[in-house]
Each structure stands twice: as C-alpha cells, then as structure tokens.
Amino acid sequence: MTRIAAEDYLEALAAHGIEHLFVNPGTDFAPIVEAFSRAARTNQPVPRPMVVPHENAAVAMAHGYTMVTGKPQAIMLHTNVGTANAINMLINASRDRVPMLLTSGRTPFTEQGAEGSRSAHIQWAQEMFDQAGMLREMVKWEYEMKRGDQAATVVDRALEIANASPQGPCYLSLPREVLGEVMSAAVESNRSHRAIPCPPEARAGDIDTLADWIAEAKNPLIITGMLGKDPRDSVVLSRLAERYALPVVPYNTRYFALSADHPMFQGSVPDPLLPDADLVIVFESDVPWLPGKIAPSANARIVQIGEDPLHGRLPMRSFPSDLTLTATCLSVLEALEVALAKRMTRHVAERSKKLGERSRALRATWQQEAEHAGQAEAITLPWLNHCLREIIDADTKVISEYSFRQEYCPLQSPGSLFALSSAGGLGWGLPASLGVKLASPHSLVLSVLGDGAYMFANPTACHYTAHNQKLPVLTIIYNNSLYNAVRRATLDMYSNGVAGENDGRFLAELPPASFEKIVTAHDGYGEKVEKPADLPGALRRAVQAVRSGQQALLNVICK
Ligand SMILES: Cc1ncc(C[n+]2csc(CCOP(=O)(O)OP(=O)(O)O)c2C)c(N)n1
C-alpha cells in the first residue's frame, strides 16, 4: 500500500510522546482518518484519537491533562469554523503558558485536479485569507504545512517551541492535499539531535541580593500566581516560608502553592499585608495586586520572578520591580534555601510569632464563618467549601473555576489544585476536569463551578465525553442564579448610580435551572441540594456514584 503524509504526521506526534489527539473532525480529516485506520491495522504507535463534541472542550481537556502530566497534547479541529470555536480555551492556555499543539484542517486550496481537491460546497466559503490570523496573537508559533515531506519536521519544530520556556500553545494548519500526499518512503527526522533549551535559572549574584534583602526585611511578603505549576515548587516554598517566617498569599493562584493549614498561609488577597510590607516577592504573577485599589509602600523593595517576568505578551502592565529575575520558581526557591542558610536572618522569631498568631486568628474566623454558614437558611460559598473537607483526600484533584476556597477547605498535596487561567475564559472547569481525570484515573477529580461557568462549558458535550470515555468526574455547581462577577463589576462603578438601586443585578440574573437533570441524560448521577444540612449527605452520595464509575453532578442552590 502507498504511504500518505498523514501517517508520518501521526507517527511524529507519537514520537514526541503525545498520547492523545483530541479531535473534532470535519471534511478536512479524510487523510487523518485513513492514517489512523492504517495504524490500527499495522499496530503502528500513534496518539489515541478522542472525539470531543465541542472544540473548547477539546482544548480544555488537553489543558487539564497537561497540568497534571506536564506533557503537551495535540488537538485537531475543523478548518476556520471549528478553530474559531476553540479560541476561548486557547486564550486560557496561552495566558497560563500551557504547552499544546493546536491544529486544524485547512480547506483544500485546489478547486479540482489534485488528490484531496475540493469535493464539498462548504470548501469555498471556509477558506480564509489568513486562517491563523484569528489566533496568531495567542500562540508562540504558527505554520501551515506546505508539503507532505515536512510532516515530521513541522511537528518537531512546533513541539520544541511549545515546550521551550516560557511554554505555550503552537498552531499548525494542515491542508487536506498535503496530508493526503502520497509518499515514497517515511520521512526522516533529526529530532533526537535537537535539544530544547533548559528553562532559565537566576544568576548567583541576583540570588545573593534577594537573600540579603530577605535576611534584612522586617515585613516581607510573598505573592504567588502560577507557582506550583511544577508541584515541587510548593514543597520548597513550604519549607522556606516556615523556616524564615515568610508570609505567603497565593493570589488568584492557578495551582496549589501552599496549604491553608500552613502557618504562613495568610489568605488569598494581598491587600491586608501589602501596605506594610518592606519586601514584596512576586512569583509568577501577572497581576500581583490591583493597583487601582492598593499599592505597596513607596519604600518597599519589589522583586518579580518568573520565566517571563515582564509578561511580554500582555500589552500593558507596569508593576514596579527593583529586582527582576528571569527564572523558574523552583530554581529560585532552591537557590534561596542555600543562600539563606548562610545568612544571619533578622526578625524571624518575632515575625514567626506575629504571623503564627495572625494565621490562627484567620483560621478561627474561617472556621466560625463556615459553622455559622451551616446554620443558615441557604447554602453559601463558605459552607459549600467547608463540606468538601469530608470528601477530599490526599489524592483528590480540585478544579476551580473561581468557586473553590482553600480557606474553608485546606488542601495538603502539591499538584492538588488547578484553577482558571488569569484570562478568565469561562467554560474551562468542567472539560479541564475531564483532562485531569484522563491523566489521573485513580484520583477523585472534582470541579467547582458557577452556574454561569457551567453553561459556558457546553455541558452536553462534556457529560457526553465523560460518559463515553469513562471519565467519572464530580461536578459541583455553585448555583447562585447569577453572574455575580458581572454584578460586582457594575456595583464597583455604579453602586451610587441607577444600576446600584437594583443591587447591580440587571443583565446579571440567571433564572434558575435544574442542571442536575442534564447529567442524567448521560447516565450520570444528579442531585439538587438546597439546604445546608443536606449537603454533606449529597456529597457522599455523589462520591459514591463516582467511585462506582458514574459521573455525578450536584446542583447546589446557593445564596
Ligand atoms: C467566555 C466568557 N464569557 C463571558 C465572561 C464574562 N464573565 C466574567 S464572570 C461572569 C459571570 C460568571 O458567572 P458564574 O460562573 O455563575 O459565577 P459568579 O460570578 O456568579 O460567581 C461572566 C459572564 C467570561 N469571563 N468568559
């Protein structure tokens, strides 16, 4: 049998360790279908294809999988229309630097005469002058495969760029004629001789400066954003924070940075500590505080650390920095441990006492809030989170689309928390939880989402995939019948305006729906919960369903 370029292409993906190709196919896929079929016949290693019936879900699944494994995955979508559907989740992955290979078919460029030329009406209207133009800003690199014999080298190039620091998505468009090109032999790749540059590490001199500043500081403060992407980050941070009494605020954290049980966990918002801090150390945070609301003291030393500490892909950002380190969190934390061990650190004992007391007081407040919430008429966020304590174990993975709060439900394990990208493209949590489950089949995987976020996720596509791919996840909807973030934004500007008279609810109200019924259409377990006292039992029943292999959803009606 003749060989086609799509076979080289799939084999190149497999050679890069890509285990899954999340696909949403179209008329452009014929050579890919043929190549998968041939591979199945010959037992040739290729990624496992998985049909996901919405493009955003496919990208978020890849995102979720990579957050757990660190390994980029590939997605293939249909021409411009399918690709357009995926851009919301691509923006999330791009801003949070999650490596992936996003690909789409390209409508055949020849109208007739070639193998793979146009054969359907849509193939004229689906052609664009610049298909990649709609997503170019959100990828590190993009290319259109021009010839069949490029199949291996374009994959090599895409993945070396996606994997190099700072990581991120790459895009490849795949014309049908090119994928279907008949090849005389398998194409060669020199990928084993193309070493990817190592992620950056800080210079020794900068580490010394930072260690000196920490040793002198009276009121240091650590703010983290993406720290914990490498789970080892949080292990070293935990040691360092305790040893040197360094308060930590994981602010809009995307990963588990520090347990809320740690005495140096000082809440999730920097505002109470920021004005008095004389040293602010920012680890991988695009927005370490909201400058319109709060600012560090003018005398404070500010340190910004990250693989791209200037966040060069953000058009505008002007946070101050007295020391800017282009380095991974882990390399800085490890180097600091060594450097600080050689220094006389002042103020540690007094700070340890002061912050320890503050942490105890905060934890008592959170506990009281939760207990109080348990007595209330309606379920609230503190109660929902507090009840999660009972079902979460060291191996549980929590996906948060804003609604999870460690304050009420401390986690303990590095790699146990994954939260929505700083870009805030809603509809991510549920499909990301499917990717996380795919990567960690033995863990309890639960997502906590708003009712708005749930609907953005194309729930039917996600529940359908959970069922068909045997990915039993637990979805918990914090259902306040509201776009509360929209309401808050209205009140921020117009609490004294006419909109404020209606509590900012205009355009933000979401009439309630029985979301628990949707999951049952996909053989899932669904329950609506309305009373605080009913929540623990409902969670237990849902976990039981999940443990028995059934996806589950709780529609938690909240105030
Ligand atoms: C794809 C997308 N569309 C719109 C928005 C704007 N937006 C931000 S928050 C929000 C409301 C979210 O509602 P919900 O998930 O119920 O959470 P709540 O704000 O009520 O806590 C919306 C619509 C967005 N971030 N992403």
Image: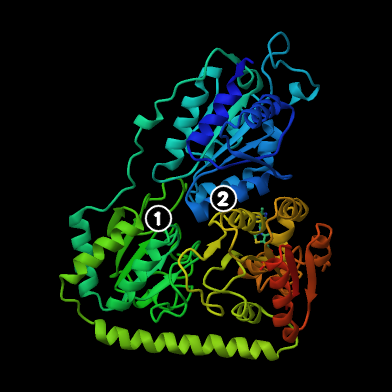
Label 2: state its secondary structure.
helix
> Answer yes or no: do the residues labelled 2 and 1 have beta carbons within 8 Å?
no
Could you say where residue 254 lies in the image, as x and y percent from the top left? 50, 61
Could you say where residue 260 lies in the image, as x and y percent from the top left? 47, 77
Identify the image quadrant of residue 125.
top right
View quadrant of ligand 1: bottom right
Q: In this view of the protein, which residue sits in the foreground, 346 or 255?
A: 255
Residue plotted at (78% across, 79% down): 530
Label 1: state its secondary structure.
loop
Q: Residue furthest top?
A: 113
* Pointer 1 residue: 318
Between discs 2 and 1, the one toward the N terminus: 2
Residue plotted at (72% across, 84% down): 532
Q: Is residue 506 left or right of residue 7?
A: right
* Pointer 2 residue: 63
Q: Is residue 8 visible?
A: yes
Quadrant containing the N terminus in the rendered view: top right
Could you say where residue 158 lies in the image, as x and y percent from the top left? 48, 33
Which of discs 2 and 1 lies nearer the camera? The answer is 2
On screen, 301 above or below 307?
A: below
Type of the residue with mark 2: His
On screen, 37 above or below 558?
A: above
